[in-house]
Amino acid sequence: MKNIYFTVGPSELYPTVPKHIANALKSGICSISHRGNSFQELYLSTTSQLRMLLNIPAAHTIFFVSSGTESMERIIQNTVIKDSFHFVNGSFSKRFYETAKELGKNPQLVEVPWGESFDFGKEKIPEKAELICFTHNETSTGVMIPLDEIYKIKKKNPKKLIALDIVSSAPYADVDYSLVDMTFFSVQKGFGIPSGLGVIIVSPQGLEKSMTMDKKGISTGSFHSFKELQKYAIKNQTPETPNVLDIHLLGKVAEDMNKIGIKKIRSDIEEKSNMIEEFIKASEYTYLAKSKSYRSETIHVVKVPEGSKVLMDKLKKKGVIVSSGYKDLKETHVRIANFPSHTKKNVKKLLNLLVIK
Ligand SMILES: *Cc1c(COP(=O)(O)O)cnc(C)c1O
């Protein structure tokens, strides 16, 4: 029996992915030159489908990199001369902050305990901050930031750039790209595609900052500097030999999702999220994120009375895989993903198995 993966990433493959891989192998996509016409067509097809799906403005550029983690590094390197500011509420937002430190920048942060969110109205953004970094959906804690709070901060600080990690909320996250400068995700979570591809969506303002830094002689990296990425993106190419199969699969999955309609994809996620929440509320499990106002729809982090291992072993015997809690929560919590790949039928199956007897 094939396992069902409710893991937070990599996760369950999108249902059409095996068919698209089989077709890709038959058509020879994995052997075409990344400097040829067929690749350029494939690239354009993927970016067009993605623009349609996520409503990305024509003026914004789409860059392909290797992962979500790489995106963090590229964004810091390309848009921060010295000072960034980070909203930290778990491991992934902390990673973004640490990346800035490791690159020799001068990051500052506001940090709240795991499972909590921020008091956005109160937070003072340092005057000198060039970039403000948010993790829309903190995968370690199951806390989701309301996008409106981010837009408010951008409107108050129009000269500052905004970076937004939507790695575990895409394509559910309905982002207004006119108010965010660098948005990024990888494909092995909400898109249900094999790992190995990251996507950064960059505003004209973000791109300009990188070009200004480059002109000033400040290093913005090498082959994956925004300058190099842009030089090739306008030709529908990438600087290096990319993960062609994944770029193809992303286009195909985005096309499939466009046929269903992004509204339906998003409302299905909300419906399944409500199913999970109703179940948890009536059970002995408890959410790490106490308030519904900031609880994630796509990553449910819950405390397990009997400990995570007993439950995970029990589920595994039935062919259902969930993620353990992150770091300090490993023994006590589990994390359940709710992505477009997860059918209502499978969610019901999971919830039936979660009943404590
Ligand atoms: C998984 C994840 C990342 C890291 O992405 P990779 O593609 O594994 O490098 C970053 N941010 C968040 C919120 C994530 O869930």
Image (cartoon, rainbow, N blue to C red):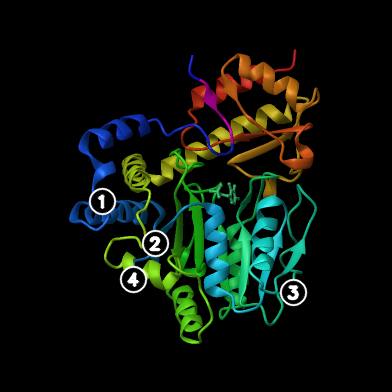
Circle nearer the viewer, 4 or 2: 4
Main secondary structure type of the part rendered in magenta: loop
- Per the image, the residue denoted by label 1 is 42
- Per the image, the residue denoted by label 4 is 231
Label 1 vs 4, first from the N-terminus: 1
Tag 4 near tag 3, CB within 8 Å: no
Label 1 vs 3, first from the N-terminus: 1
The answer for how far apart the CA atoms under marks 1 and 4 are is 18 Å
Circle nearer the viewer, 1 or 4: 4
Q: Amino acid at mark 3?
A: Lys
Q: Which residues are magenta?
A: 3-7
Q: Is mark 3 within 8 Å of ligand 1?
A: no
Judge whether residue 280 is colored magenta: no
Q: Position of residue 258 (x, y in %)?
A: 34, 45
**Which mark is on residue 162?**
none
Q: Amino acid at mark 4?
A: Lys
**Mark 3, residues whose alpha carbon is within 10 Å: few (<14), some, or many (≥20)?**
few
**Which mark is on residue 62?**
2
Q: Position of residue 144 (x, y in %)?
A: 64, 50
Label 4 vs 2, first from the N-terminus: 2
The answer for how far apart the CA atoms under marks 4 and 2 are is 12 Å
Label 4 vs 3, first from the N-terminus: 3
Tag 2 near tag 1, CB within 8 Å: no
Label 2 vs 1, first from the N-terminus: 1
**Mark 1, residues whose alpha carbon is within 10 Å: few (<14), some, or many (≥20)?**
many
Q: Please tell me in which quadrant of the rendered image residue 52 appears.
A: bottom left
User: Residue at horizontal 24%, vertical 57%?
Assistant: 40
The answer for how far apart the CA atoms under marks 2 and 1 are is 14 Å
The answer for how far apart the CA atoms under marks 4 and 3 are is 37 Å
- Per the image, the residue denoted by label 3 is 124
